[in-house]
Each structure stands twice: as structure tokens, then as C-alpha cells.
Image: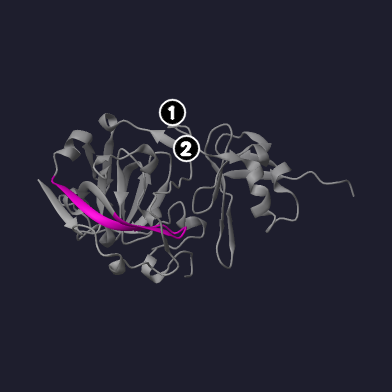
Amino acid sequence: MTSEEHLPDDHVDGNALAGPLAEVFTADVTVAQSECAHCGATGPVARLLVYRDAPGLVARCQECGQVVLRYVRTASAAHLDMRGTVTLAFSLAPE
Amino acid sequence: MIISRGFHGRRPTADRKLPPGQYETTGFPVLSAGPTPRLSAADTELSVTAETGRRHTWRWADLMALPSERPTVDLHCVTKWSKFETRWEGISLDVLLADVETDADHTLVSSHGGYTTNIPLADLLDGKAWVVHTYEGEPLAPEHGGPLRLLVPHLYLWKSAKWLRSIELRDEDEPGFWESAGYHDYGDPWREQRYRGD
């Protein structure tokens, strides 16, 4: 994010990703810990800022505002762009 | 000097043509991939950088001193709404790029906030694209890209970048924000080029 001022907007939290991403992940992505590739902030995906009044879903870092992931669902494919994510960590039950 | 280009008056409804898969809206939906920056016209600076590295810049007063046009155009958003006969005022890219020496075929357009989109240079020339600052007679509102946005109405609206900051002329094509996430590289609504591979 730059130092520019911003107007109030209609973003929602990362829980909005749960439904769309359930189509490509078997685990609940919103409880995974994501690490921002821009500022290194970590936290649950549910805390990301999601812009969905757009041609796709855009999830931004709750700390720096940069894009962490983008999801575009076309008629026949799902595109998940994660170049803004260092890791996505899922807690799993011990084997 | 102001030149009106495009349609004059309201066309009969029967003459309005929708590209395939689109529906008409009379509102003006706001789509955005991020926060809406609060930018001041007075601080606006637009740059065009040629493939040679030569950079041309215009401040707001420079832009306002250029010949202005008033295009009336139809908008087609890839999310399937279309809006007929929107009235804008701005500067033709033919004027803006007249003194820019280039052999490039591609452009990468960048916005405040980090958004980008790629457009062939030929699609910005010959009366097909404008840098606009006024919508329906009023200064362009921030949610619609004010103070300055690109207007390329023959392509899907994601190509008409809001909060315009720079245009880079390039020898190689580089996909922009949506193009690199599955959307079509070109985005012609009449050929329904929504997604990569369409």
C-alpha cells in the first residue's frame, strides 16, 4: 500500500473466500495462516481484506494492503494467483 | 478546443446493440480490486515512457491545456453489464502520444494503487481511446476513477484503468492484473473474449 489516502470502501473479511475456495481446496482455507509476500505479516486467511465487487476475488493483506491472493472462476477453470503469498499453513490433526 | 466525437443525441432503443452475453444497466456499477484512492487533480501527474526509456510527463494544467474531446460511448463490463451512451470529456491518446517516438507494439497501463492492464498500442490510437476527467458534465468521481482514468470503450471495461498514473510502451506484451489471473489478454466484448482461451 502506498501512503495515499483512501475513501471508505465495501471490502469484507476473508471468510468470504470460504465458499468460492471450497471448490478447489478440501480444507477450510479461511483458518489457514497466510504469510504476506510483501510485508511478512502472518495471520488467518479470514483476516484478509477481500474485494469482491470485481471481475474476481482480490484478498489484500490486513497489514500492508498489498494483494495476497486473487481468485478468478471462469466457465471452465479456477485461477488462483498466489504470488503475494509466501506460505499458506494448514493445521492438521496428528496422524 | 472541444471536439464531440461519437453519437449525437439519444439513439432509438432499437439501435442499441448488446455484445453477446451482456445485459443493459442504467446505473453505473462500481467495481474495484482494492481501496479507492483519494487523489487530488492538482497533484496529478501522468507519464508515458517509451521503450527507449524516454519519459514524457504531463501535470494537470498541461493536460487541461491540450485539445479536448467529448466522446459518447457504450461501456461493456466483463461482469456482463453494459451501459449505453455514457458521456465523457478528455484528451484523445492520439493527442497525448503525438510527440512520443516509439516503435513499440504493446502498452502496460498502471494505476495508483498498483492495478495494471495491457493493451496493444494500436488500440489506444486512431480515435479509439481517451484519458478522461469529466463524466456527464461533472468532474470524474473517485469511485469511477477520478481524477483521471483511461477510456477504451471497444474493449471490456477492465482495460479502462481507473486512477491512471502511467503508460509504458513496450516491445514485449506483459499481462496486467486481471490478464495474469485468467482473463483474456485482449478482451473484445463483441467476440466475448472474457477469459484466457476464449
Q: Percent x, y for residue B17?
A: 33, 68
Callout 2: chain: B
Callout 1: chain: A
Q: Amino acid at mark 1?
A: Ser
Establish if B174 lies above or below A65: below
The front one of B37 and B75 is: B75
The front one of B179 and B192 is: B192
Magenta highlight on residue B75: yes
Disc marking residue A3: 1
The residue drawn where x is 34% and y is 38% is B141
Can residue B171 be seen here? no
Q: Are marks 1 and 2 on the same chain?
A: no
**Stretch in magenta:** B67-85
Establish if B51 lies above or below B34: below
Residue designated by label 2: B35
Judge the density around disc 1: few (<14), some (14-19), many (≥20) Cα neighbours within 10 Å.
few
**Which quadrant of the structure image shows residue B137?**
top left
Establish if A84 lies above or below A55: above
Q: Amino acid at mark 2?
A: Pro
